[in-house]
Amino acid sequence: MTRRSCRRGVRGFSLLEVVVALVLLGTTGVALFAWLNQSLDTSGRLQQRLEEARLLQMSQALIANINPASEAEGELQQFGVRQRWSAELIMPLETVQTFGAGGIGGGWRVGLYRVRVQVDFLQSGRRLSYELLRVGKRQA
């Protein structure tokens, strides 16, 4: 066999093909790591938002029974949560009549309040502030 015939039978990668394959593999790896990092960041932000939504629901459930017409300011501490609120009348009180089974019932003074709430979660040390609109009522 001559030297020329030996070379034709040998198959394999040239150095250029190996370099191109490594460049493609490296580029794909960098893109994959960037995508993975972005996914982890998004997941972390989503977890934080879910925790804030859970804390907000918990706070609103605890403060749901507050009547801003009779308790314009106050503080409530339950289940490791301390809430402070202040209510401001934003629509004047109006007298309304209630109707029961026996006819006309008692009258109520009803108004719309802006309630500012500050919540301290004592175990985690987190603080949350928000505002909500509530109807307040008192016996006329």
Image (cartoon, rainbow, N blue to C red):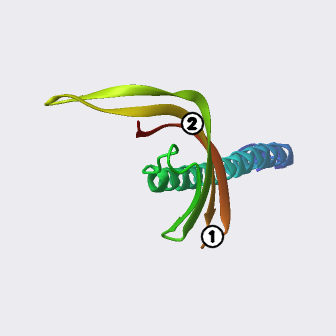
Residue 10 visible in the shown view: no
Does residue 15 lie above or below 112 as drawn?
A: below
| Residue 80 percent coordinates (x, y) | 53, 71
| Residue 62 percent coordinates (x, y) | 46, 56
| Residue 113 percent coordinates (x, y) | 57, 36
Q: Amino acid at mark 1?
A: Ser
Q: Amino acid at mark 2?
A: Tyr
- Would you say the residues marked 1 and 2 are in contact, meaning their CB atoms lie under 8 Å apart? no
Of residue 113 and residue 12, the one placed in the foreground of this image is 113
Q: CA distance from mark 1 to mark 2?
A: 30 Å
| Residue 105 percent coordinates (x, y) | 25, 32
> Is 92 left, or right, of 128 in this rendering?
left
Q: Residues within 10 Å of mark 2 (few under 14, many from 20)?
A: many
> Is 113 left, or right, of 104 in this rendering?
right
- Mark 1 lies on residue: 124
For the point 73% across and 49% down, which residue is it?
A: 29
- Mark 2 lies on residue: 113
Q: Quadrant of the C terminus?
A: top left
